[in-house]
Every structure is written in structure tokens, then in C-alpha cells.
Amino acid sequence: MEKKNKSKYLRDGSEPKSKYIKPKEKKEKKESKSKDIFEAPEYRDSVLTPKRAREMLLEEERIEEEARRLEAEEAAELPVEEFEITASPETETSAQSEAVENAENTAATTPSEEAQVKSYHLKSASSRSENRRRKVIIRSVVCTVVLLVFAELLYNFKLGIPFLPSLFSVEFSALPELIASIAYGPLTGVAVCVIKNLFHMVLRQGFIVSDVNNILLDSVFIVIAGVLYSRSMFAGDRRVKPPKGYGKRGYRRKRIFISSLAGLVISLIPQFFITRYIAFPLLEKFYKPAFTMSMILGEYQNSMAGLKSFLPAAISRFLPEITSVSKGIIFFNLPVTFVKLFFVTVITAIIYKYISPVLHNRKEKH
């Protein structure tokens, strides 16, 4: 059975008092004796260690170098005619000039080669950025056209709401316009709105005043919502990082909803003035036999009377009387517009995270 080697010292550094462990003095004597044996010249010369082999190799190199030096000194003492190579001064000068030219050429070509490499890399980087920019522009144009077609289709599907004056109808074509404004900027959303109404005027031959009113009302909402979203998501040219606890999609959805809702509330004020002082006066001017202010006021009063007759008496008594066109706009147009655009805002905030990779050609991990 093999015996286990025991440590010479204890954990505290003291020597054990066991009889099975040799004292420190005996081991030191043995080590000193072994060192004397290893350092003896007989042992050192008889054993070929790596250090000894390296010393021998250096010694041989030194001896060879000394021999070459002696041979060179002996050759220098001999007559020059035997060792001199015949060379004319012209060949010496030509050789010197060639060496100088080669040195100048190498010194001149090195910076030019570096400049060529740099210019090549710059050209390749600029070409890649140009191709990337071209692809972004093409994708943006294609997606804008798709949103325009979608807006035109939604504009043709108008909903009729009971107890609403016959002059008005509800449509949700502001949904693609808001998406374009958030994705590509407010100007793109306005362009979609304008082209949509121009197509409607040319192809459907509708009321020009209603199309102009639609352009003005939707543009106000789209521009305000797009500007607020871009200001909340971008600081200068840099994208704002979402705070801790928000993912990219959740933070973007929150920003879209808040910006669009704020744009909706702010746009109600200019929408009142556009409807009261631009749309209705133009209707009265261009279609005076069919549309007058008194006829529009009568439409509002009939709608309010029908709504009061439909609702219970406890609720209908709180509804006001429509005595002017401005009151009709406040109690009919603005609430309907608010509900419609609020629905558009909610739908945009929900679906934008799914269509954003397609609009911007990117892959999101969140």
C-alpha cells in the first residue's frame, strides 16, 4: 500500500514534531550538496542542457565571425590589382543615379498608392450610400402610392349617421394620411390628402367646396400630429431612446397615441373657423339656390329635433336649442369629427408597429 506524502510544514508555518518528517537542517544540507554537485564543472560539461547547447552555438558563431574577420584583414594586405573590379566612372555614376531614381520613385509612389486606396474606399462607400438612399426613396414612393390608393378607397366608402344633417357624411380616409405623416413626415401626409381629393374631384366630379373643406380639415390634424410625433421621437437628427421599462414598440405606440390625440384636440379650434368662415360661405356663394345659411341652420334644427324625439325626456331636456350655425357646428360637427379622428388615432397606434418594418424596410427584435 502506497504511503501518502506528508507536508513538511503545518498551516501556520511551524515545523511538525513528528518523527516521520525529516528536520529542516538535514534537507538544507542535502540541497546544498546537490547544488554543489550540479554546479561542478565536470557535471556541467558532461550533461548537454538547453542552456549549455545555446552557449556552444554562440561560441561557434563567435569563432566563425573571428575567422571571417581575419580573412578580410589578410585580403586587405594583398595587392589591389588582384581584387579590384574594373569599372568606369560612367558606370558608377549611372548606377548611383539609378539608385537615386529608384528611391525617389518608391517615395513618390507610396503616397499615391495610399491616395488611390483612400479614393477607392470613398467611392465605394459613396456608391453604397447612394444605392441605399435610392432604395429608401423608391420604397418610400411605393408605400406612399399604396397609402394613397387605400385613402381613395376609404374616401369613397362614406357612412351615413342618423340624426346628422344631410350635408355631412363620415369617412375614415384620414387613417392612411396619418400613417404617411408619421412614417414619412407631415408633408407626405398632406400630399396624400391633396392628391386623394384631386382624384375625387376629377374622377367623381363631386362638390369642389366639400373637397377643399376636406383638404383643410384633414391637413390641420395631420400636420399637427406629425409635427408633435417627430418632435417627441427625434431630437434634432438623433432618435430619442425610450426610457427604461419601455420597449421600442410600446414607446412608439404611446408617442403616436399622445401626439395624435393632442393634434386632434388642437385641430378642433381651426376646424371650427374653417367650417364656419370658409366652407359655408363658399357653399352659399357657388351653390346659392340650393345651399344658403338659413337652409343649413334649418338642417341643424331638424337634426336636433329628431335627436330629442329619439332620446328620453330626462336626457333630451339637457340638449340646447340650435339658434345659429355656429352652435350647430359646435354640437354636431366637432363631436362627430372628434369621435372619427379618435378612432383613426387608436387604429394607427395599434397597427403601426406591424406595418413600420414594411414602410422602413427594417427588422425589429422587440
Image: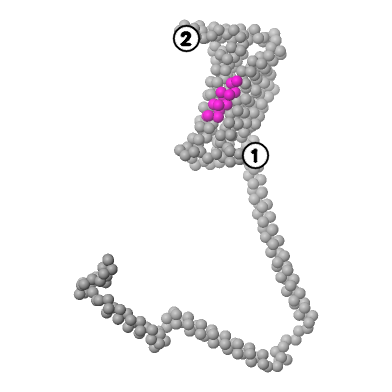
Q: Residue at x 68, y 52 (%)?
A: 123
Q: Residue 261: within the magenta?
A: yes
The quadrant where residue 280 appears? top right
Nearest the camera: 119 or 202? 119
Whether residue 162 is situated above or below residue 90 in the rendered picture: above
Q: Residue at x 32, y 83 (%)?
A: 33
Residue at the disc numbered 1: 137
Kind of residue at badge 2? Ile
In the rendered structure, the answer to whether residue 108 lies left or right of residue 257 reads right
Colour scheme: one colour
Kind of residue at badge 1? Ile
Q: Position of residue 244 (x, y in %)?
A: 47, 39
Which mark sits nearer the N-terminus, 1 or 2? Answer: 1
Tag 2, which secondary structure?
Answer: helix
Question: Magenta stretch mostly in which secondary structure?
Answer: helix
In the rendered structure, the answer to whether residue 300 lies left or right of residue 282 reads left
Whether residue 329 is situated above or below residue 38 in the rendered picture: above
Q: Between tags 1 and 2, which lies in front?
A: 2
Q: Which residues are magenta?
A: 257-269
Tag 1, which secondary structure?
Answer: helix
Could one spot residue 123 in this view of the protein?
yes
Determine the residue located farthest toward the bottom in the rendered image.
Answer: 78
Residue at the disc numbered 2: 315
Q: Label 1 to label 2, Cα distance in Å? A: 55 Å
Q: Quadrant of the N terminus?
A: bottom left
Q: Residue at x 69, y 22 (%)?
A: 202
Q: Position of residue 364 (x, y in %)?
A: 52, 41
Nearest the camera: 124 or 199? 124
The quadrant where residue 63 appears? bottom right
Q: Residue at x 62, y 11 (%)?
A: 325
